Amino acid sequence: MTRTLSQFGWAAAALLAVLNGSVAASANDLVCSRVYTLNADFDEGTLLNVNHNIPDQLQLNTETKPFPFIWVACSARGTVVRIDVNTGTILGEYLSAPAGRPHNPSRTTVDLNGNVWVSNRDEADGIGGVPHGSVVKIGLVIGGTRVDAGGNPDPNGEYLKPPFLYSTAVDRDGDGLIKTSRGLGDVRPWPDFGDGGGGGGGGAALVQDADDECILIYQRLPDAPNARHVSVTKDNDVWVGGYPFAQRMFHKLSGIDGSILASFDARPFGAGGYGGFIDANNVLWSASISQNSLLRYDLNLMAGMAIPINQSYGLGVDSAGFVWNAMWTMNTVAKLSPAGVMQAGFPVPTGGSCSRGVAVTLADNHVWIANSCTHTVTRLDNAGNLLKSIAVGNTPTGVAVDANGKVWVTCLGSDTAERIDPTVGLGTVDLVVNLGPGAAPYNYSDMTGNLILGVVQQGTWTVVHDSLVAGTDWGTVSWTSTEPAGTSIKARVRAADTIAGLPGIPFVDVENGVNFCDKGVAGRYIEIQAVFSRQPGIQETPILYDLTVQCCNRPPVALCQDITVCTDPGTCEATVEAADVDAGSYDPDGDPITMTIAPPGPYPLGQTIVVLTVTDPLGESDSCEATITVVDCEAPSVECVPTTNPAGKVVPPAGNNPKSGQNPDGFYQLLAADNCDPNPAIYVADSASAFMAGPFQSGDKVKITQAPGVKPTQKPGAGVIVAHILLKGDAVVVAVDASGNMARCMCLVPPPPK
């Protein structure tokens, strides 16, 4: 069953048994691939702003929404809290800087992954003689089980144990758990063993010292002290600008590691730094109250201009891209075109006093303004007409729109965050969240992520596959999709040997069906994220029909052994199969392999070097050499055949000795044949002595006489008779081939007749 959070447009499965470890396969079986194509498959992952309302495919929601949280900077306490917008529950409280570093967080922005970036406006200490500001990135965990350090369930435990519905936290100590705040007042320590310097020269600034594993990045900002501008880009990086009530540097930071990617100096423009956002055209807007101007900086061209706006303060943007700028004690609001042109009839009164934060409900393009001195939030239509003034807590500063379309206001003087339902009486407070004493929530920039979703219409489907084998190398992700003009589906992956370890690994962008084995994506668990996007104004959606993840097709390993084999029966060569020289070749992925040897057999007597090649089903192969030694193991055949008297007479009949049988004259032909040796040697041994006559060749004729009382001898014969052999006993005819194989037969020679 899918676990849905339909109120805010995203859903997540329980991640099923694959993340709980209860799997049917044995722990040693590599689950090398997985295909996702049915609703049940997609439900194994987390759906954010995507759906399968049309069965067995994923598409973007008609309306994309942010995560169901609001991040509030408790400025006076130096912390940030995350609040569930549905219940008002404070889910965590986090320090905005290491111990000993100046805090006073105020400006916030929420990125596409639900993380918050917060600048510390009190930080201006120098590094190398240059004043530096600071900014922190804080992640989140959704789901999981509260446990103690040993992983045992404990509602008050300091740790969260996976599986999670969603997590961007980093398991820094590798214990498989995430140590993080339980809620309001549970602020984990953050000693400064090195984090306080940031990335050092603008390098990677991943946090190492914070006890809370949701605190991810802390970067110092050269020549950008008292940072007050933080805004996220369509690529999920951030621009941060310093503002000691004068213009300073702006720096673009990597959303992955916080390193400084680009910079520009706002001083030549005399505007910018007090807070703002980036619009759908990649234009950065930044207020500057002391300079009575608004910076419009085109990040495509890296060029900007200052627009005169008295007491330029809070900023918002409507669905048409028009920029709304509150004008502090002027108690008015300006409306500018995307090109920066003031609209006719503007500025107009806000309906309140000391106007600060601005937000727009995109469903109706109404503008909501926090008025600190009258303790109100006023609602204006898109033409600037006042619709309602809503009484809220003391000294409201910032406003933001949540995933449900409700408006939140942070109240500096009453230490509260309050929710307004715009559908009840044109706006009624329906929830008040007490932030605790000394919170002083001074923040009025984007607190929910609603602004960036007005820039990038994006959704994601994120799933984790368990291979069951640690260190699995991953190789391809392929998918079937339709992507109308102005839309796209992209994929990225990361892998780790624990689920909790995944968020600490950077995603690697991958292409459809393109091998990425060289990217080093390795681990038991692989997390795949499909990112669905469409440009502003596009109504069509990209569609994902299926997605397949496959581990690297590691080539098989060929292992050889030298062998010695006998010739095949009756031949002087041997037939050898590939398996005979195989010494345990294998495929690391468990795939079947085929084996061949070259040159092919049969193989002649002696040594032949062969190459064994093993190949997997995808054509990857490996080879090794083996020596095949063929030996002749087969004995020759041998016969002793009675033959005629050399005079040509027939074999005479037996004499008086009844045992003499035929051939009493003792003429024999010696015959031998061998599979390899064309001329095996033949010997005639005496069964009654150690005497041996020979050697002879096959076909030789000899006369053998048995004379028990004489000395055995071999004498030359006459004519066709090669030798005359005199023995004490019977003749034993022995044939020996070149390999030393021996065969014998008896040649019963009768004694002469008496």
Image (spheres, rainbow, N blue to C red):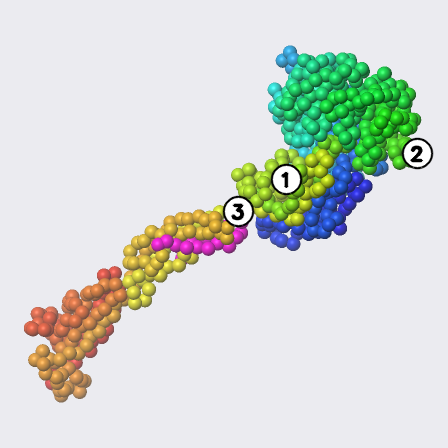
Classify residue 494 by image quadrant: top right
Say which residue label 1 marks. Answer: 490
Depth check: give the residue in front, 674 or 362. 362
Residue at position x 72%, y 51% in the image:
55
Proximity of marks 2 and 3: CB atoms separated by less than 8 Å: no
Residue at position x 88%, y 32% in the image:
420
Q: Which of the two discs, 2 and 3, labels the residue nearer the N terminus? A: 2
Say which residue label 2 marks. Answer: 425
Proximity of marks 1 and 3: CB atoms separated by less than 8 Å: no
Locate residue 478, reporting x and y percent: 60, 45
Depth check: give the residue in front, 152 or 257. 257
Mark 3: secondary structure = loop
Residue at position x 73%, y 36% in the image:
537
Locate residue 119, reporting x and y percent: 73, 22
Locate residue 138, reporting x and y percent: 72, 30
Residue 47 lies, with reference to residue 734, above or below; the image says above
Give the residues drawn in magenta, as a range: 580-599
| Residue 21 in view in this figure | no
Tell me the kind of residue under disc 2.
Answer: Gly
Distance between mark 2 and mark 3 Cα atoms? 63 Å
Is residue 597 one of those drawn in magenta? yes
Say which residue label 3 marks. Answer: 553
